[in-house]
């Protein structure tokens, strides 16, 4: 098994969208998510984790140790029961009485088999129903909401379709109407954290997992193109590496070293080239290094 990570990491991801909807809000008719007070666009951590999971699933194709727990059309209970069978638990309610190590055995099985549990953690309700402490695993990798650099102006686009749904409707009309929301252009910034302490104590997130995570972040939109999302791409992955398990500097001080600004503040941005990205690497905190991976 690959070696567990020993260093804390903080990282910044810059990604953009052109003529697409990066993350629709189902409570607002699937409009792009917006902070109502500032007008800045939002993309949830759940959305970003989904992209990472999808890339790993496509790249590894259920390779042992790299399966995905949170996936479409697979009930969570199905994977949970697999763990119970492996450990030899017939009745989850009496599991701890029969085997005091049931918690750690189940957790280790889930972490060793599922990349996303090893990375992001998980809430496994099947185990929680049996009052097992392993039902909630805190992952070493955490992401915050992405926020656009500038306020966004979502637009509703009306579409026409020549194919009519029913024969009855075809007698009455020649086309059908539809709508979708787009953001003409926006650059988003997301921030993430990797705890070597949790990796060592809980999930055993390894150096190989870390390299796969960087690869997944850089390519998370490359196999996720659709008419709704438009053109999305990761533009920067800026990684701050600490030389210790607990870290050498507060995350916010490192994130403040990343400066993103429009070249012309009077012109609406329409491409990545309209922005200038600078990372202040002068007088870095002792024990912290910075690498721009893309």
Image: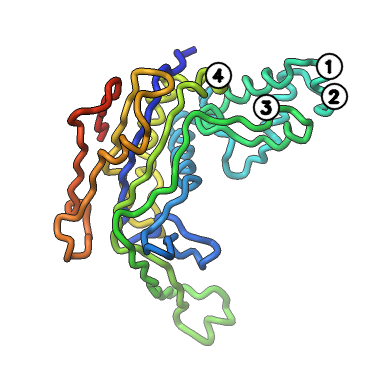
**Marks 1 and 4 close (CB-CB < 8 Å):** no
Q: Is residue 80 left or right of residue 186?
A: right
Residue denoted by label 1: 98
Residue denoted by label 2: 94
How far apart are the two marked residues, 4 and 2, measured between alpha carbons?
26 Å
Q: Which is nearer the N-term, disc 3 or disc 2?
A: 2
Residue denoted by label 3: 134
> Which quarter of the rendering shows the C terminus?
top left
Residue depth check, mark 1 versus mark 4: number of the one nearer the observer = 4
Residue denoted by label 4: 201
Task: Write the residue at 35% across / 38% down.
Answer: 252
**Marks 3 and 1 close (CB-CB < 8 Å):** no
Q: Of helix, strand and loop, which one carries label 4? A: helix
Q: Which is nearer the N-term, disc 1 or disc 4?
A: 1
Nearest the eye: 129 or 69 = 129
Q: Residues within 10 Å of mark 4 (few under 14, many from 20)?
A: few
Q: Of helix, strand and loop, which one carries label 3? A: helix
Q: Residues within 10 Å of mark 2 (few under 14, many from 20)?
A: few
Residue 168 occupies quadrant: bottom right
How far apart are the two marked residues, 3 and 1, measured between alpha carbons?
16 Å
Taking the image as drawn, is residue 225 in sight? Answer: yes
Task: Write the residue at 57% across / 78% down.
Answer: 167
Q: Is residue 292 left or right of residue 128?
A: left
Residue depth check, mark 4 versus mark 3: number of the one nearer the observer = 4
Nearest the eye: 185 or 59 = 185
């Amino acid at each position: 098994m690959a070696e567990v990570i020993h260093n804390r990491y903080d990282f910044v991801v810059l990604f953009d969208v052109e003529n697409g909807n990066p993350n629709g809000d189902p409570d607002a008719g699937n409009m792009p998510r917006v902070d109502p007070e500032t007008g800045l666009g939002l993309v949830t951590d759940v959305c970003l984790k989904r992209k990472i999971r999808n890339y790993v699933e496509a790249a590894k194709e259920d390779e042992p140790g790299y399966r995905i727990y949170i996936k479409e059309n697979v009930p969570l209970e199905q994977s949970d029961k697999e763990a119970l069978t492996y450990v030899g638990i017939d009745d989850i309610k009496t599991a701890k009485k029969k085997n005091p190590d049931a918690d750690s055995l189940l957790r280790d099985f889930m972490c060793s088999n599922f990349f996303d549990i090893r990375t992001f953690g998980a809430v496994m309700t099947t185990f929680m129903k049996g009052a097992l402490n392993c039902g909630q695993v805190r992952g070493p990798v955490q992401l915050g909401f992405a926020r656009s650099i500038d306020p966004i102006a979502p637009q509703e686009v009306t579409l026409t379709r020549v194919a009519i749904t029913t024969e009855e409707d075809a007698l009455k009309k020649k086309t059908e109407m539809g709508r979708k929301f787009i953001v003409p252009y926006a650059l988003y910034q997301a921030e993430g954290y990797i705890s070597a302490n949790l990796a060592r104590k809980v999930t055993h997130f390894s150096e190989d997992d870390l390299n796969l995570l960087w690869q997944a972040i850089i390519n998370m939109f490359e196999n996720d193109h659709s008419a709704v999302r438009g053109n999305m791409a990761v533009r920067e992955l800026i990684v701050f590496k600490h030389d210790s398990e607990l870290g050498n500097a507060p995350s916010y001080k490192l994130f403040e070293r990343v400066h993103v600004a429009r070249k012309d503040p009077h012109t609406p941005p329409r491409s990545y080239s309209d922005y200038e990205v600078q990372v202040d690497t002068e007088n870095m905190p002792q024990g912290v290094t910075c690498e721009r991976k893309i």
